[in-house]
Every structure is written in structure tokens, then in C-alpha cells.
Image (cartoon, rainbow, N blue to C red):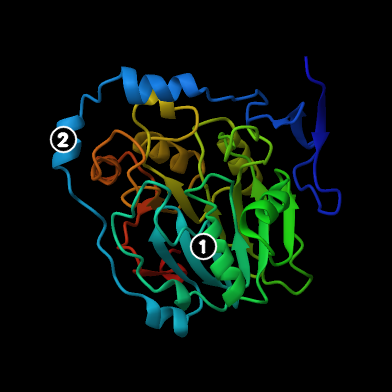
Amino acid sequence: MPSSRRVRNEQLPTIRPNYPGNLMVGREFANANEQLYEPAFSTVFRWKVLSKNPQAEAKKQDTWAPAVQPCAEVLRQPPEGTLIWLGHASFWLRWGGRTFLFDPVLFDLPLIKRRHPLPCAPQDLTGIDYLLLSHGHRDHLDDDSIRLLARQNPGMQVLGPLRVAGLLKRTAGALPPTQEAGWWQQFDLGPDAPVEVVYLPAAHWHRRGIGDLNTVLWGSFLLREKESGRTLYFCGDSADGPHFVQIEEQFGPLDVVLLPIGAYKPAFMMQRSHMNPNEAAKISNQLRAGHFVPMHYGTYDLSDEPASEPLRTVEQVAAEGMLNAQLHTPAVGQPLRLADME
């Protein structure tokens, strides 16, 4: 049996009382329930070879893709308190006089093309203060995107999970200054920073190659404006789990939550690492969210459900009164004003 230990960044404060740090068993980080999650290639084989998608014809006929609204002008003169969805799990945020970029994937994935264009040219993404990386999967951490952003933003800092710096050095070359955090740790943005950033748990996993299973941590981000106390939560990738109750206990009610709603079928493959639209609505309610912006749908074909199903489902849940938050479903590139989410 591999030995276990607790790890964190000793240079950063841990804000959850008595939290001992992230559990590692051997070389692997444990999941939010403190159990190892080791997805097997046999499960992928079962999905791709042995199983038949009961919605295969519906998926083939469903050619829907999110509408796209160009946003280059907004990026050049960014209004304070503006949030823009760039597709999939990528968001641009101007808040507190600083510019944040979440999980930017600006190009096609290996063997998977974008289903809609980026709402701006990649070269328009300048003036980035903080690049926030939730975890190491390729649809959230893209080498080419990070290389380009590093060249265009010489003052940018990277905020991410434990062990991400080594991964970035191997995959994306020379990089800007990088801070690594464990769960419940607050990044050091300086005493005058108007927004605090905390790294929080998720139920997910890590792998980019054959021998690196769970060697880099995964998680989510909570941003809180110091002056107003307003919060924005970016989930990254996560299955349902008790960590959402813990997050609400520490920070709730939350003002704006960005939660994934896609890539959930077949359940035997996806349910331990992603949430479906009904689960996302339940989690939004658990977080006592005021505003819910869905993500992680429509951009890449990663799973068996038809393209339009995630958004249709979450809109139906909201229409039936089962979602307590106000639902926002912007076009890709459409600016949302945080001032309107109060």
C-alpha cells in the first residue's frame, strides 16, 4: 500500500479552519471525498467499442451550436465588472481594475474541432493580469493557447493547482510567474489587490499522458471583491459531491456561479468527473447562488448527448421553478455586466 501524506503550499494561507492539506496517496492526489479516483482505459473501451449510444441518431441530427457575438471592441476598452464567455469553460473577466482569464482554450483540441468560432482573434487577448487554470485536462489547459498568451501578456501571472508549474514547464515552455495552491488556500495577489482569489475543491482527476495519473491537483476558484464582498465562483470540472456544501458553508450565499452542464453521457463514463444539467441546478441551489451562468457545453463534442440537450435541459429546469438562481445563457462573446447581477 503506497504511503499517504498531506500537502499544501506553505507560503499561502489556508482559510478553512483545521484543514490539514490535500491528501496524496503515493504519487496521486485523492479526490474531494479523499478517495483515489483512477479512471481505467477499459471504461473508455466499453464506451467507444462495446456500447451503443441510444441517442446516436438524435445527436447526428442535432447541428445546434451557440450563437457567437464578436467582442474584440469590448476587450480593447473593457468596462469594469464585465464577464464574457469565450466558449466551453473559457471566460474573460474584468473586475476590480484587473483582468482575469479562466481556462483558455483558443483553438481546436487534438482530433476535436471547435463547433463555433472564437468571438475574438486570439491576438485580441492582451492586458491579462491573471491566468487561472483549474486543472490539467487538455480542454482546460491548452499548450498553444498558453504559449500565445504568455507572449502577448508579459506581466501576466498564472494561478493554478499544486504541481501545475512542472506540467506547464514541460508542455508549454517558458512561462510567467506561477503560484500553486492546494484546496482552501488563498493566492497572494498583494495587499492592494481589490479581488481575493481562493482555490477550492472539485471531484475530478488528472491525466495528460500514460504515467501521470492524478499527479497534478484539480479544483475550482472563488473570487471575492474586497470592498463589496461580492463573489464569483468558477467550478472548472467537477462531479457532484459534499464539497459544494462546504463551499457554501465557507462563502455562501454566492452571487455568481459558473457551472458546467455538458459532457455527462454515458453516465458510467462521466458521472464521477462531470455533472449533468439537473445536478448543476441542484448545486447552484446548494450554493445559494443569485445568478447561474452555464458553461462546458456546445463548443467541443466530448460525449454522447446531443449538442443542444444540456442547455435545453437547464432552461427547462429553470422554467419549472426548480432553479433558485437567475439563469443567464449568453451568446459566446456577449458581455454580461456584474452590476446587473445584484
**Rendered-image quadrant of the C terminus:** bottom left
**Rendered-image quadrant of the N terminus:** top right
* Residue 280 in the figure: left or right of residue 138: left
Which kind of residue does numbered mark 2 sit on?
Ala
* Residue 255 in the figure: left or right of residue 215: left
What residue is pinned by disc 2?
58
Identify the element where label 2 is drawn.
Answer: helix
- Residue 321 in picture, x, y percent from top left: 29, 41
- Residue 324 in picture, x, y percent from top left: 38, 45
Q: Earlier in the sequence, mark 2 or mark 1?
A: 2
Residue that lies at the very extreme toward the right in this rendered image = 10
Task: Pick whichever, 320 or 35, lies toward us.
Answer: 35
* Residue 127 in the figure: left or right of residue 187: left
Relative height, residue 239 to residue 139 (above, below): above
Task: Pick whichever, 46 or 87, lies toward us.
Answer: 46
- Residue 14 in picture, x, y percent from top left: 79, 47
What residue is pinned by disc 1?
145
Residue that lies at the very extreme toward the bottom in this rendered image = 77
* Residue 164 in the figure: left or right of residue 282: right
Relative height, residue 38 to residue 165 (above, below): above
Residue 196 in view (yes/no)? no
- Please report contact status of discs 2 and 1: CB closer than 8 Å, yes or no: no
Identify the element where label 1 is drawn.
Answer: helix
Q: CA distance from mark 2 to mark 1?
A: 33 Å
Which kind of residue does numbered mark 1 sit on?
Ser
